[in-house]
Image (spheres, rainbow, N blue to C red):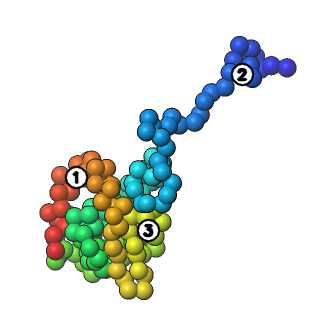
Amino acid sequence: MTPPNHDSRWSRSDTRLDTRLPVPPDGPADDDGDGNASDLSPDALFDVLATTRSRYVLYYLVDHGGTTTVDTVATAITAWESETTVDSVPKNAVEETVINLVHATLPKLEEYGFVEYDGAGGVVTPTPRADDLAPFLEIARQLDSPEADGTLLED
């Protein structure tokens, strides 16, 4: 039995919707684990960039480079979110940001290969893969706020 208003022309077994994503002309992204951002699926890329805190961490790390402490990143992010300077942020607000970074944001960024996070040492280091996000971060930065040029993140 067919449902009412069913058009049998669309139920043929040889007429299927192709749900596969098209392969880029130069072939699929390599799977050799070299850490390029191009290895990410769009879903993964947008998952990483979906939260403000993840973007702020990446902005800070890409802008400042090198290894830094979680506390330094948390202070900068808290200042940015509070629209104030790093000298003016309350200690308890920084502690709340640290908790979020340690338990959610940094593990996710590490899982995707954008940072190396040493929980015991309390340090975070951007990987070369984080630099590969620069074009995406620039677009996101422009959309986040006019202050996203890094002026509130200066140490």
Cα distance between the residues tagged 2 and 1: 50 Å
Residue 154, position in %: x, y?
16, 69
Which mark, residue 145? 1
Observer-nearest of 149 and 5: 149
Residue 150, position in %: x, y?
18, 62
Cα distance between the residues tagged 2 and 3: 44 Å
Q: Mark 3 highlights which residue?
A: 110
Left or right relative to 154: residue 93: right
Q: Mark 2 highlights which residue?
A: 14
Observer-nearest of 155 and 130: 130
Mark 2 surroundings within 10 Å by alpha-carbon count, few (fewer than 14), some (14 through 19), many (20 or more): few
* Quadrant hosting residue 119: bottom left
Q: Residue at x 41, y 70 (%)?
A: 106
Mark 1 surroundings within 10 Å by alpha-carbon count, few (fewer than 14), some (14 through 19), many (20 or more): few
Residue 104, position in %: x, y?
45, 69
Left or right relative to 85: residue 53: right
Amino acid at pointer 3: Glu
Residue 88, position in %: x, y?
17, 75
Left or right relative to 111: residue 7: right
